[in-house]
Each structure stands twice: as structure tokens, then as C-alpha cells.
Image: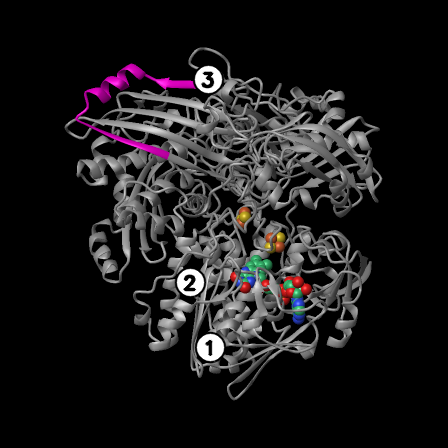
Amino acid sequence: MYSVNYHRASSVADAARQLKNGDAKLLSGGMTLIPAMKTRLASPSDLVDVSRLKELQGVKVSGKTVTIGAATTHYDVSTDEKLKKVCPALAHMASLIGDPAVRHRGTIGGSIANNDPAADYPAALLALGATIVTNKREIAADKFFKGLFETALKEGEIVTAVSFTAPAKAAYQKFRNPASRYAIVGVFVTKGKDGARAAVTGAGEDGVFRSKEIEAALAKNFDAAALGGLKVPAKGLMSDIHASADYRANLIAVMAKRAVAAANA
Amino acid sequence: MGIEGVGARVARKEDKRFITGGGRYVDDMVVPGMKHAVFVRSPHAHAHIKKIDVKKAQAMPGVVGVLTGKELKADGIGNLICGWMIHSKDGTPMKMGAWSPLAVDKVRYVGDAVVIVVADTKGQARDAAEAVEITYKELKAVVDATKAIQSGAPQIHAEAENNLIFDWELGDGKATDAAIKSAAHVTRMKIVNNRLVPNAMEPRAALGHYDKAEDHYTCWTTSQNPHVARLVMSAFYNVAPENKLRVIAPDVGGGFGSKIYIYPEEIVCLWASKKTGVPVKWVADRTESFLSDAHGRDHVSTVEMAFDKDNRITGLKVDTIANLGAYMSLFSSCVPTYLYATLLSGQYNIPAIHANVRTVYTNTAPVDAYRGAGRPEATYVLERMMETAARELGVSPAELRRRNFITSFPHQTPVIMAYDAGDYNASLDAAMKAADYAGFTKRRADAAKQGKLRGIGMSCYIEACGLAPSSAVGSLGAGVGLWESAEVRVNAVGTIEVLTGSHSHGQGHETTFAQLVTQRFGVPIDSVSIVHGDTDKVQMGMGTYGSRSGAVGMSAIVKALDKVEAKAKKIAAHLLEADEGDIVIENGEVKVAGTDKSLPWFQVALASYTAHNLPAGMEPGLKETAFYDPSNFTFPAGCYICEVEIDPETGTTEIIQFVAADDFGNIINPMIVEGQVHGGIAQGVGQALLEGAHYDSSGQLLTASYMDYTMPRAGDLPSFKVSTSNTPCPGNPLGVKGCGEAGAIGSPPAVINAITDALGVVDIAMPASPATVWATIRATKH
Amino acid sequence: MSDVSLTVNGRRVSGNAEDRTLLVHFLREHLGLTGTHVGCDTSQCGACVVHVDGRAVKSCSMLAVQASGSTVVTIEGLADGAELHPVQAAFKEHHGLQCGFCTPGMIMTATDMIARHPQGLDEATVRAELEGNICRCTGYHNIVKAILAASETMAKGAKGKAKQAA
Ligand SMILES: Cc1cc2nc3c(=O)[nH]c(=O)nc-3n(C[C@H](O)[C@H](O)[C@H](O)COP(=O)(O)OP(=O)(O)OC[C@H]3O[C@@H](n4cnc5c(N)ncnc54)[C@H](O)[C@@H]3O)c2cc1C
Ligand code: FES
Ligand code: FES
């Protein structure tokens, strides 16, 4: 790791100020940033730690509206009883991230700000039609995730929370990369008042995306059977030593079917 | 057996420190004034070094020294060597290319060490390493051994034309060809054994300390054989004469072969310590380990197996190309030859065998012994062939094996080995019973109803362990003898220290070796200490690999115990005024048989040191040394059965059950033996399902961290069903055979036989990852 | 450089360290607690697991300054004096370790796992919960056995204590 200066923010406003230092970066759970710094792939001059800010923590549920603070850990999301009642799929998804120690530190804000093409949260938020709240504005998930490791966040902008309306039905199915255990393919499906949405992570060359094919099939009938003849095109999907684009295309169809079945169960 | 003696499930003495955080590994060592080293490694697989500029790096904060291969050579440090001479079939010696501990004018694989940077902290050393400027002229690289021997391939060492190191054969080619020609049936396959990275959880590390006042070096290193390290560093690398070099291998966090060899880093750390005047510690990052630890396997074989009309094997012909990487590592030459081709008879009566092995340089990390070393490759060849042959011949895999089992011992194979004892039907029976083999058809049908594909596969392995009779290996080209030493020191109060040349890095020697002593003298196990891993304490030893610590290391202890016992009896007979032949030692007492005359053990010990009243002419003291050289290899064998269920939609393979029935001869501590089998199976299943080192065509290692190299996790494996049967080994005093490698040897073919059975295909590449399985299913549909 | 103050294994400690110092290095090099190990660069092997404020975390993926103000328990602080923690005892009894390198992280993960599953554990759960801990020696068989056994012992112990209290 290169030398770095650490600051512990006292508030979101303080963090915003501190971020103006040199090439400063926010530090939340550190489960992505610290490993990247260790291998010298990331080299911020300053770190602004927001992980201890109470204002960024916790899951709030009011009616069907769910709000999750940016610094809420994956563990806290996965075990939140209120959330499990209104949207168990998201709690389940959070329980599939990494391992217990990673879930104890990693946060939803860090995950979506990082937008790893194989991360789980981006698929969930896209399928949930969530809103990403920052210290400056609110951004619809559809506009937030912009490509590999790219988001709509501007320089110095801080994610403070994520909110969404719990859908009637939802489920997530993840097929893990055998080595890294991130998603080779993850499909999050929802059935809400605006119909069915299906988002795919792990597979797209441009990162997380909504699958037109799956959504079209589910629009008519939110049932696994509706995906029976589903053919997902391999075009635009990643190929690497772990999975070819064809294989990923197949997995998208399989995971989508299983997710819909789970959502209906 | 007592509760702490031979055969008992004694909980391990060494565990106390490991479970409380008190283990002492190399990285835990601190020497006053110690600095930290980082190696600058080649980013290219093959390149000329045009220029190395260290000025900027030297000026960086905290930097103590930045040293290059030129300076190392100028100080007379020697090249790394391979210690086992193999001759090609035309009589020419193997073509060993020079391997400088720091590359001087050429780099040959990604990770080749070029410069060492020493600084106050590791962070500073890394900062400075980035400031070292090296100008390379890139050359074309080759990573695939079958391509490297084609004409026009990049030439890696001037010494080895077409990158061919040797072209070696074993067995009777003519007889084998004749058998194939006249066969009723011939099974033919191309068999690939994938490249693996050993991945001991403790990364390699070295701490070199030159003491100027004493003109003496100490090296703490993650070694499986510190004495061999000292010998080689003295004799070949000119680091220091043996009397001025102490090598300590403290607690070592796993080895699996990868920590047998002497690597550039420990040599360079010792030399750099003298050069800079400070103790120098280097600890590998995991990625550094992936790049620079010796890899394992990487064979491609073409195989023909001939059968007569009664399904008896009449001949086996194997043509193997073995990738040895960019340099010849210490034992690299013997792995694909004498540890491989000599096992090609397996558990079977095969009248004619011929093996041809070509070893090849490529621009990849050096390849050497990894758990099993050669024997897994031989077993994979044979047991995949048997499976395929059974399917082609329309007989059950068990039946074909039984038909060909060796049933009378001793048995001389056509490939050097003389098997001493075994009962292959017994382990096959035991495994089939434990696996409820008979019930498989129903289980398969049930799974099919759920849309799942079930398969079952077996593997009957044999291995040669207890490495090895010194004169035998000497005649085959080994540069060292493979005996073991032991010293038993009885203290004046009767407590006992055993000094051994074996090295424990997980095997539990501190317990099993102590069990031998407890058994012999009836003293509590807590009064026995095992000392190992330090060349200043133990005079000489050959270390731990090749499942040799039991059969060879413990046999040396038995010999030393015999001598101690004999002397103790003489002293006791003298003190008790009895006949030496009537003395028995039991439960910590030395007694005259058939009388009530006895002495506590400690009094005999004490008497030997007070020396007030010893038999005339007897030297004081109670301490004996023994060297044990085995008369033969040992031959553990067994049968493994794997049952899998495949999800055809995703290609995921679940191991439903894994059964191991092993014959390890007599067993000192069944708990430890089972643990060794579990670990071996996990590595074998890892090879079959998960693990594979993958270089791209330019020589970049794509699987250089756990993000891309799949390590077996708890969730990938089931609990294993293990059992043992016993035909005692007649070749050593304990009747033990060795158990350290069996799991890794026997399991890969069992898994692949099961998967190919489930899929109804002839072959599938290892690792049979979900993507590979899915692609195979799809290819068979089209 | 920053001041780092922690409560480690019940003892208040403080020191001055470069901000880039990882918690694992602070523990090992500043405090001499070398039971916590480093086995990878990618936060995957779990050899470095310690408890920070009661939760298992990977000390290789956290800066020492990040932890400042927190309570840390390492493998050295698990036993109660001479008496082994039930998880330590179970690892020994069931041969849940060979080379011992992964062991501190395994044991710290196991104690955290057992604490989070007061209702008890089954084999599948234990295996899933070990996702972030790699062992190359044991094949996990005896680690799983040891954790299941420790979980039972501790549940019994807890019941015993509850009875005593009642
Ligand atoms: C072993 C391992 C396995 C993993 N497996 C998975 C997996 O299976 N699935 C998965 O999805 N992820 C996985 N992860 C990643 C994990 O989920 C991370 O926690 C997450 O991606 C990043 O969150 P963090 O809080 O740790 O962020 P950090 O690492 O602290 O930060 C990540 C990035 O986000 C920025 N950032 C942080 N907070 C904010 C904010 N509030 N506003 C704006 N920018 C911010 C940072 O500046 C940084 O660039 C794994 C990680 C590890 C180490
Ligand atoms: S060292 Fe922390 S996870 Fe490997
Ligand atoms: S005991 Fe050696 S890595 Fe687990």
C-alpha cells in the first residue's frame, strides 16, 4: 500500500469537506478499497472514513418503503427482521455476499459506489427500481449504474442512503464464480406495481443490466414457465477463463427461472 | 497399546501452541536490526535484460540496499541446480540450463527474480522496488510443453535444443509393442494432467542473518528439509561452508512438496544480509507464491492399453510430455521419471510396460514435486484407462480391476518396483461396501427423476512411499541418499528428547514420534519431546516428503530406541543383579521378569549419568544415535469411490459421497492418519473439480490469486468416509507404509470417472468446473 | 502517522503507526501478537480473522487507525487463563488442525459463527459459514466436526449457566 492520510469524518458534511483534500476517497467498509490499495491498484492520497457515521447506518421500514443507510453493513441488511418481512429477497441477497467477515464490514453504499460488474447489490437495486440518495440529489437506479465500475456519482458526491418500495414479489439467484465467489451470473427479479423487472449482474460487458428478454416474458406471466423457451443472446456478455459468454447466457436463463420460482414460492 | 502408545488416538501435543496463537513461523521471527526485502520480478515471460538502473531506488527513504544478479555472481554465489541426474535414452545427460538466483541477462518466466531491495519496512522496500528501472527486450514466449518441443519454438536455454531436457524411457518397448499388436482389444486415450499450484497456506519466507563477528550465517526458512537446504546452499551455492551456516525451519505452515526445494530467495537473503550488514527478512505475498513456488503436475500423455480375450492386460504403452517450466527445480527430473513411470503397473499384473518421457522447458514457473509427485500422474493415467477400457469391453469397472489385480506377493513389476505386500481385493471390497455400490443404480434412477445426472467412479491406486533406499536411488541418479537419522537422549531424570531429521509441517510428529517412545518405555507422553528442524540441534537429516517420515524417520527412531533399550537393560541388570535377558521395561518400570524386583525408569537413567555403579567398561550416559536406510520402498494402496450428482442446467457437480479404503500397514495414530487422508482427498478433489494454473499464450499467469485460482472451500466438499485395512509392511520394523500422499493420488481419477459416468462421455478436462461440464454436456447434445 | 488506541484482549494499548498500517500488522509487529496470520493478498483466506467490537473481521483488510477506539480480540485472548476456550479444545480433540497456519483464523471465525447461531449449527451451515476461511491441510472434515462439537458443548454450558442462574 502507498502512503495515505486517514481522516474519520464527524458528519456527512464534514466528509464532503474532507473529500476536497488532494486525491481523497471515501472509505466505508473498506472491503473493496483496502484490498485494492494493498495491491497498489488504488492509491488515494487521503481516506475519509464514513463507516462510523450513525446518520448513514440502519434499515428503516415504513409501510412498503425501505430506506437503508449507505454505511449499513451487508450483515445488518441480511439479518434485519423488518426488512425480512417486506423484502426478504434483499436480505437473502445480502447474505450471499462474500463471507461472514466481509459482510461484517462491507456496506451497501460502498458496493454500489464501486459498481463492480460482478457485485450483487447493483442487480438488486436495478430490479427494485431503487432510488440512490446522495448528499446532493436523488438518482434512479436506472440512471445510476453506468458501466464497469462507473456510476452517475460526481466528484466528491456521497451516497447517503438507498430507498425503494418493496415489491409484491422478488428473489435473487446467484451463480458464484468458483474462485472469487462473486457472481458469474446473478439475476434479481421483482414483480411490483410497474410490472416485472429483471436485472443481471456478473455477465454484462458493460456491467449490470436489465434483461429485456426476461422482462418481456415475465410481463405476460410472472411464472418460471413463462421463461421456458427463453433464449438469452450471448452478445454483449463477458468471456473469461471461468465462463464463456455462451455459458453466461445459459446461466442467465437458468438463474432467472429459478429466481422467479423462488419469488413465487 | 496403552492410551498413549502405538495405535492410540492421542490428541496432538503440538496443538496447544497452534490453537492459542503460540505457533512460531518464519514471519513471526524478529532479529534485532532486521530489515525487509522485496524482490523485483520479471513482468515478462521471456526477455533479455538490457539494463538495470537502481540509482533512484537506492535514494528512496529507508532503503538499505538494492542488489542485482551481477553483484551476486561477482561474489561467487552459484546457480541453482537439479539434484537428480537423468540420462536420455541415447545416453546423453539431461540438459540443465543455468538458473541464477537473480537473473543476470535473461528472464524466463513471469516472476523470475531480478533485483532484491532491502529497506526499513516492507512498504518502503516495495516503494523502492517500483523505482528500480529495468529495460527488457521482449522475446516470444511458449507455455505449452507440446508446443515448446516443436521446431521454431522460442529457445529458452542455450543448453537445451528445442527446449528438450531429456528423452527418457523405462521398460521393454519391443515386448509392449508386440502385446499391443497381438491384443484382442486396445484402449487408447490422450490424458492430460492439469498444472496445479501447491498453495500451502503459509507463504514461503526466509530470514537471513549474517553475524560478522562470528563469520556465521543463520537462515530461518519455510523448509520441509532444513538439512538438505544447508547441504545444497553450502555445496552448490557457495553461500557458506556447512559449519558456518545454520538453517532453522521452525513451525512451517504446510508444504505439500513446494517447500522441499531451495529457492533463490533464501540464498539471496543470506547473501544480502552479508552485503548490507543487516538481517534480511522476506515473506512472499500470495501472488508472489503463485508466480514463484514450484508448481505441480502438467503432463500430457498418449496411452495404449492392450487386453487379451479374457480381459487381462497384456501391455501398457505410455508416451508422456512433462512441462518442467523455465528452470529445473531441485527434484524436478525424478518426478516424471522414477516417481512416475515406476508406478505404471498400478495394482495390476501387467507383463509388458513401456514408458517414454520427454521433459520440456517452457516460460512458466518451475514444476517439481507436489503432494504425490509423479504417482498421482501415473494413477490418473492407469485408472482413467481402466475405466475407459471397462466401458469399451462392457464389463464392470470393479470386475475388470479384480481380473487384473496382483494377488501374490512379493511381486516384481516390469518397471523396477518390487511390491512387498498388499490385498487389493480387500480395499476394493471395503470401499464398495462403504459406498453401497450395489444401491447406486437405484440412486441414479431417483436422481434422474429430479433431472439430475448421477455417476459413480472408482480408482485403485498404489504408491511407492518411504523414500527411499539410498543405493537404489543413487543408482538411478539421485544426488543424495534418502536414509533418515534419529538421536534418542534420555535425560538424567528419565525424560526423553528425540532428535529427528524428519520435519513436521502439519504431520504431527511431535505426537506420533513420542508415541513410539511411550510405547517402548511406558513413560508418559508429556515426558517425551521431539526436536526437529534445526541444523544446530539435529546433526543431519533428509526431511519430510514422499510419505517418508513414518516408514523411514520413525524406523530410525526405533533403531535408536533399540540401542537405548539395550543399554538401559544392561545397566538395570547390573543394578538388580539379574540376567540382562530377564529385564523387561514396562509402564515406566524396569523389571526382572517373573520377580518383584524392579527399578523406576528414571533411576536407570539417573544411574547412567551418576555413573557410580555401571557395568565394567561401560561409558556413562544414555543417548544413542541411529541412521536408518530402508531396504525397499513401501507400497500403500487402496480404493477410492466417488459418487457425484450433476445439475445439467448449470454444470455444477456435487460430491454426494467420497469413500476411501486404504491399506497403510500398521498405524501409529489413526486420528492423524485419517487427517492426512482427508487433506489429501481435498487436494485431489481440488485438482479434479476446481484447481488449475492457467497461463495465457504470452506467459502471464491468469490464475495468480484466489480470485482466479479456485481453492477447495469447506462448502465444496462433503465429509469423507475413510477406513483402513492392514497388510503390515514387511520392510521396516514398524510395519508402516505411509499415508501422506494417498488422498491426493487416489482421488482425481475417482472423481473424473464418476463425472464421465454421469455424463456418458469418454473424457473431460480437469478441473471439471461447472463451465467445463456444461460445455461438455452441450457438445454431446449437438 | 496516527495514534492508534485499542483494547486488545482486555488490555488498553496505544501506539503510533503509519496510516497505511493494516490492523494485522499492527497486532503482529507493534503488539507482538503473531498468532494472527496473513495468508493472502485478496482478503479471501481468513488466516487473519480477529474480532473487532464483537464481530469477526479480516484484520488484513482494515487499517489499524480505522479500528482505533475499538475492542479487539485475537486468538491469544480467547482462552481464559490456562483454560482453553471450548472451540480451541474442540479443535484439539477432533484434530481440526494440521500445520496450524489457518487455525487462529478458523477458531476466531468459529467462535463468531457459534455466537451468531445460538439455536445451534448443522454441517451445511458450518460449511457455508466457512466460506472465507481456507485450509489446505485438513480437507475441512475435522474442522467441521470440531465446530459442531464446540457448538454443542457451548449450548450445554449456556443451558447449565442459565439453570444455575435460575
Ligand atoms: C473476499 C471478498 C468477497 C467479496 N464477495 C462479494 C460478493 O460476492 N458480492 C459482492 O457484491 N461483493 C463482494 N465483495 C465486495 C464487498 O461487498 C464490498 O464490501 C463492497 O463491494 C464495497 O463496500 P465497502 O463498504 O467495503 O466499500 P469500500 O471498500 O470502503 O469502498 C468502495 C468504493 O466505494 C466508495 N465509497 C464508499 N462509500 C461511499 C459512499 N457512501 N458514497 C460514495 N462512494 C463511496 C469508495 O471511495 C470506494 O471507491 C467481496 C469482498 C471481499 C473482500
Ligand atoms: S490474510 Fe486476511 S483474508 Fe487472507
Ligand atoms: S491446518 Fe494447515 S492450512 Fe489449515
Q: Is residue B685 above or below residue B140?
A: below
Chain identity of mark 3: B
The amino acid at mark 1 is Pro
Local SS, label 1:
helix
Q: Look at the image and give the residue range highlighted in magenta.
A: B166-191
Q: Is residue C143 above or below residue C115?
A: above
Residue A136 appears at what percent x and percent y? 69, 77
Residue ID for mark 3: B476
Residue ID for mark 1: A88
Given residues B20 and C58, the one toward you in this image is C58
Residue ID for mark 2: C124
Given residues C38 and C62, the one toward you in this image is C62
Relative placement, left or right, of A5 versus C96 is right
For the residues labelled 1 and 2, the Cα–Cα distance comes to 21 Å
> What is the crowding at mark 1: few (fewer than 14 residues within 10 Å), some, or many (at least 20)?
many
Local SS, label 2:
helix
Residue at mark 1 shares a chain with residue at mark 2: no
Respond yes or no on whether mark 3 lies under 8 Å from ligand 3. Answer: no
* Residue at the bottom extreme of this rendering: A63
Query: Residue B189: within the magenta?
Result: yes
Residue B732 appears at what percent x and percent y? 42, 28
> What is the crowding at mark 3: few (fewer than 14 residues within 10 Å), some, or many (at least 20)?
some
The amino acid at mark 3 is Leu
Q: Are marks 1 and 2 in contact (CB under 8 Å)?
A: no
What label does residue C20 carry, if any? none
Local SS, label 3:
loop
